Image (cartoon, rainbow, N blue to C red):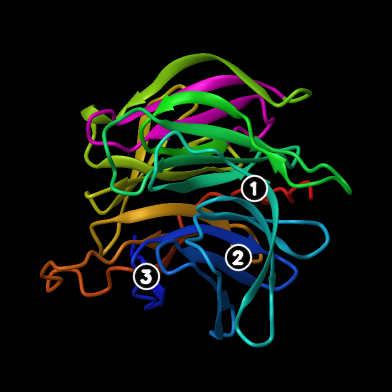
């Protein structure tokens, strides 16, 4: 299967692809650049600039975005002048200095989840997962951590029925993917267990998604692969990319049968063997995905 380059974005860290069906468009972010990007099926691309690093996004029913950044959760509205108007909705008290949000997405009920990490990829287990739910008309709220003692939380995804939550830790010293039973009424994960030990597979676990058959797709960063695991944890498919550091995958396209993949463009290294690093790619894996839930906002 050949991966098609759709945007030679040269993102430092491309992440959080989200398909928007009413626009026939893919949105994603470049984390350190603090930029929100859009690619449309006609090939047009547009970008907007945030005031902080922008890690992950979710669309609200009102048409704006929720974005997890360095200091909290913001409501983001693209402006005609290329800026993102930001209104802080929730703050976070990081365990250390130089921390930011990383991977995140909504559960099937629209609760926005996002994890924090040290910007320098430190090995301390000071990262956490936070669940954001809006307080309509209320003041800026302080986020409360729901899961602690993570290093680089990543790989968040939810089963089609919403009753299983997946989370990975990308740090080289961990490289595990966990599954949780997920209470869809309260938005509470419990019964944590190892789903995949990525130390037994090529690459480290980065961003992920789930398809309509309930299988879990994970970007195996450093290996140039995207791996598909069955709900039982069996590897049943491997897709190759022309870059070493795929970061996150998401289903989209008019039939939700295209797998979009973002990637990293490393700095200070020879890229002769991966000139398309930092690009956004599309593959046709032969299965369909699920529509991304809108965020409660």
Residue 176 position in % (x across, y down): 34, 27
Q: Residue 169 in magenta?
A: yes
Residue 25 lies in quadrant:
bottom right
Residue 121 position in % (x across, y down): 29, 44
Going from N to C along the chain, the mark reached first, 3 or 2, is 3
Q: What is the span of residues highlighted in magenta in the rendered image?
A: 158-183
Task: Please state which of residues 198 and 81 is positioned toward the viewer in this rendering.
Answer: 81
Which residue is found at the position 52% from the left and 64% from the top?
28
Residue 212 position in % (x across, y down): 61, 42
What residue would you read off at disc 2? 253
Going from N to C along the chain, the mark reached first, 2 or 1, is 2
**Is residue 240 shown left or right of residue 270?**
right
Which residue is found at the position 74% from the left and 64% from the top?
64
- Specify the label residue 290 is tagged with: 1
CA separation, marks 1 and 3? 26 Å
What residue would you read off at disc 3? 11
**Badge 2: few (under 14), some or many (20 or more) residues near its Cα, within 10 Å?**
many
């Amino acid at each position: 299967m050949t991966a098609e380059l759709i945007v030679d974005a040269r993102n430092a860290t491309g992440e959080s692809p989200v398909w928007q069906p009413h626009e026939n468009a893919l949105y994603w972010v470049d984390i350190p650049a603090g930029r929100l990007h859009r690619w449309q099926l006609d090939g047009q691309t547009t970008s907007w600039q945030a005031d902080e690093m922008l890690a992950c996004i979710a669309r609200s029913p009102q048409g704006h975005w929720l974005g997890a950044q360095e200091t909290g959760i913001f409501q983001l509205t693209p402006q005609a002048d290329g800026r993102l108007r930001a209104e802080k909705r929730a703050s976070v008290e990081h365990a250390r200095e130089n921390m930011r949000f990383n991977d995140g997405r909504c559960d099937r009920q629209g609760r926005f989840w996002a994890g924090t990490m040290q910007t320098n990829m430190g090995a301390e287990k000071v990262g956490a997962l936070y669940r954001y739910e809006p307080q309509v008309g209320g003041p800026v709220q302080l986020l409360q951590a729901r899961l602690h003692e993570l290093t680089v939380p990543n790989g968040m995804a939810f089963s089609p029925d919403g009753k299983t939550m997946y989370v990975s830790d990308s740090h080289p010293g961990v490289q595990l993917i966990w599954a949780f039973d997920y209470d869809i009424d309260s938005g509470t994960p419990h019964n944590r267990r190892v789903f995949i030990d990525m130390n037994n597979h090529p690459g480290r676990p980065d961003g992920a998604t789930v398809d309509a058959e309930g299988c879990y797709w994970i970007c195996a960063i450093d290996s140039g692969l995207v791996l598909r695991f069955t709900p039982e944890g069996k590897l049943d498919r491997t897709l190759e990319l022309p870059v070493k550091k795929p970061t996150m995958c998401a289903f989209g396209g008019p039939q939700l049968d295209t797998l979009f993949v973002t990637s990293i463009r490393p700095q200070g290294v020879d890229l002769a063997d991966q000139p398309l690093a930092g690009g956004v790619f599309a593959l046709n894996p032969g299965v369909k995905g699920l529509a991304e839930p809108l965020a409660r906002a």
